[in-house]
Image (tube, grey):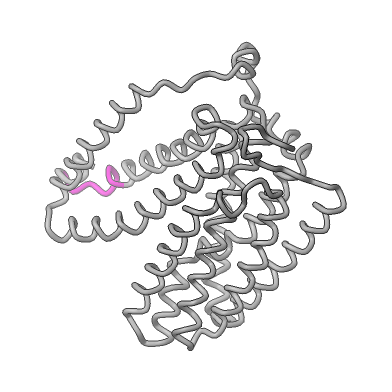
Amino acid sequence: MFVAIRFDSVACMLLAFVIMQIAASVYRPAVQSSLPAVVKPADLLKANGIFLNVDTLQRIGGTALGGIMVATLDLFTLYALSLVFYILLVFCTVLMDIPESEQSATTKGGKLRFREVFPLIRSEPSVLIAMVNTAVLLLFLTGFNLLILNFSELQQAPDLMGWLYAVEGLSIMFFAAIAKRWIGSKNLVTGSILFMFLFAVSFVGMSFSESRLLVILSFGIFGCAFAFFFPMITTIYQLKLPDEARGRFFSFKSMMDRIMNHIALLVTGACLDWIGISAYMIILAVMASLSGAITFGIAKKKSIEVRQQLTGTVSV
């Protein structure tokens, strides 16, 4: 970026953004696959909730702080400060010591191939159920900013955008902090599926797009469901997949999410133009309900259970 700023080069700027995206695509899978190595199984849900809170803080606070810094500092100074903090972060990362599990050490000689992840996913119904439900929610999550902008324009209330971001973010942070206490040793599979119906309720509320109160309340409900659902499914992945497969799986999932994000963004934009936001939210509610009902039936029929015991052991 320094080269792009110095020479006003669009090509260098695009190259820098590509490198940033490559780094970002490695970061999240690395964190999610490393958590089980440094956290006891009984604390995985809590750790995933904390990670979600940190992610929410950086998304909301980082955007606000970034806007202030862009308005008050020149780009060169801004990227220079970013570089200093990245160097400090790399230094702290080098000092970290992540213990290697016995299972990972024994399989180190024969590393898992990327294509071997697919049989693992098929052999674990709980993982497959979590991935299917997540794919449905990506339709909303990908177009999140676009939908908020649409609500704001429809109600001709620019301040509504700030309220929706604040309510959704605060709701996520509050409920993610108490997720483990509420869930305890309950079945994570059926628990995560039931929250699909809460997502559907929030989408129905958002379909009343001209009601300011209902839209704000619905975003709060969405934040609540989000705060429980995503730590639960991440914990399912971490508990059900073997140590040597987690890194490959989370990398594969990150790649699939990015591909689906582009498709979902196109679908969201097209639906908002063709059928309007109210009808689109009803469609999302129906899809979330159907996905929840189908996967709940499968989970009950096959008696799929993934539980996190409070004593530190995992019951599956």
Query: Image height check: is 233 above or below 35?
Result: below
Q: What is the quadrant of residue 4 in the picture?
A: top left
Q: How many marks?
A: 0
Q: What is the quadrant of residue 7 in the picture?
A: top left
The overriding secondary structure of the stretch rendered in magenta is: helix
* Magenta span includes 84: no
Residue at 18% x, 48% y: name it: 8
Residue at 39% x, 68% y: name it: 165
Left-right relation of 316 to 195: right
Q: Nearer the viewer, residue 127 or 40?
A: 40
Query: Image height check: is 246 above or below 71?
Result: above
- The magenta segment: 7-13
- Looking at the rendered image, the quarter that the N terminus falls into is top left
- Looking at the rendered image, the quarter that the C terminus falls into is top right
Query: Image height check: is 200 above or below 311?
Result: below
The x and y percentages for residue 16 are 31, 41
The x and y percentages for residue 293 are 77, 64
Left-right relation of 158 to 310: left
Query: Image height check: is 143 above or below 80?
Result: below
- In the picture as drawn, the residue positioned furthest to the right comes out as 301
- In the picture as drawn, the residue positioned furthest to the front comes out as 311
The x and y percentages for residue 177 are 47, 53
* Magenta span includes 10: yes
Residue at 55% x, 37% y: name it: 251
Q: What is the quadrant of residue 274 in the picture?
A: bottom right
Left-right relation of 31 to 42: left
The x and y percentages for residue 48 are 51, 44
Residue at 61% x, 16% y: name it: 102
